[in-house]
């Protein structure tokens, strides 16, 4: 049996180890500006053609999968997104408008969720993002930003993305 002094010492060690293992989190009311560059692969694409003569021509949906690379931002919360898994599900109306759900998963398993609205251009699409929240240190986070999505090939894309954020 351990002596009371040994138990107290062991408790302090366990408490300290638990604090080290806790994920970092943003302080209440913290603000930041994230910038990143992503490489994505188109993994699914479905197109539904409208009848001949319809001005919208088609409706489409797809999935993209890749990595986000942190390029700028001063907060540890920003740096957590370096090499985060980046997954997008999107739909387009055939007239150049699209919406999507962007999910970033850090190497520690925390998720950050964004919604996007885009407009097609000759290189890909540009648009806005709205931060919807997340898990762990991203819980309750809100913000807005923009993206520039570029087609490199018919299956490979990059996404330059930035947003300003704040925690509750």
Image (cartoon, helix red, strand yellow):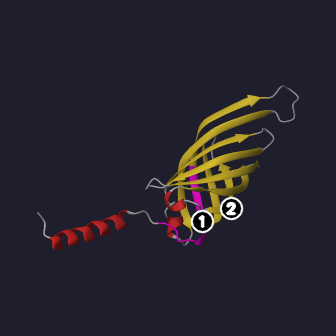
Residue 124 lies, with reference to residue 62, above or below; the image says below
Q: Residue 76 appears at what percent x and percent y?
A: 49, 69
Asked which secondary structure carries label 1, the reply is strand
Magenta stretch mostly in which secondary structure?
A: strand
- Report the disc number at residue 58: none
Residue 2 lies, with reference to residue 98, above or below; the image says below
Q: Residue 141 appears at what percent x and percent y?
A: 60, 62
Q: Nearer the viewer, mark 2 or mark 1?
A: 2
Residue 49 lies, with reference to residue 106, above or below; the image says above
Q: Nearer the viewer, residue 26 or 144?
A: 26
Apparent side of residue 61 relative to residue 12 in the rendered image (left or right)? right
| Residue beneath the point at 59% across and 72% down | 29
Mark 1 burial class by Cα count in 10 Å: few <14, some 14-19, many 20+: many
Apparent side of residue 59 relative to residue 20 in the rendered image (left or right)? right
Residue range corresponding to the magenta coloring: 25-39
Q: Nearer the viewer, residue 12 or 50?
A: 12
Q: Are marks 2 and 1 in contact (CB under 8 Å)?
A: no
Number of numbered discs overlaid on the protein picture:
2
Q: Residue 72 appears at what percent x and percent y?
A: 57, 68
| Residue beneath the point at 60% across and 64% down | 35
Whether residue 68 appears in this view of the structure is yes
Asked which secondary structure carries label 2, the reply is strand
Whether residue 155 appears in this view of the structure is no
Quarter occupied by the N terminus: bottom left
What residue is disc 2 on? Answer: 144
What residue is disc 1 on? Answer: 34
Q: Residue 30 appears at what percent x and percent y?
A: 58, 72
Instruction: Give the spatial CA distance, label 2 vs label 1.
Output: 10 Å
């Amino acid at each position: 049996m351990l002596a009371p002094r040994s138990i107290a010492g062991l408790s302090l060690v366990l408490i300290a180890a638990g604090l080290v293992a806790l994920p970092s989190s943003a302080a209440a009311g913290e603000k930041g500006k994230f910038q990143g560059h992503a490489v994505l692969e188109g993994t699914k694409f479905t197109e539904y053609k409208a009848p001949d003569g319809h001005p919208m021509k088609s409706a489409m949906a797809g999935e993209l999968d890749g990595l986000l690379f942190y390029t700028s931002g001063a907060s540890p919360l920003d740096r957590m997104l370096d090499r985060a898994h980046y997954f997008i599900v999107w739909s387009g109306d055939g007239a150049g408008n699209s919406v999507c759900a962007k999910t970033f998963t850090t190497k520690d398993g925390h998720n950050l969720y964004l919604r996007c609205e885009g407009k097609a251009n000759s290189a890909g699409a540009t648009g806005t993002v709205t931060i919807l929240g997340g898990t762990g240190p991203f819980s309750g986070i809100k913000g807005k930003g923009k993206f520039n999505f570029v087609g490199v090939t018919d299956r490979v894309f990059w996404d330059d993305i930035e947003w300003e954020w704040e925690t509750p």
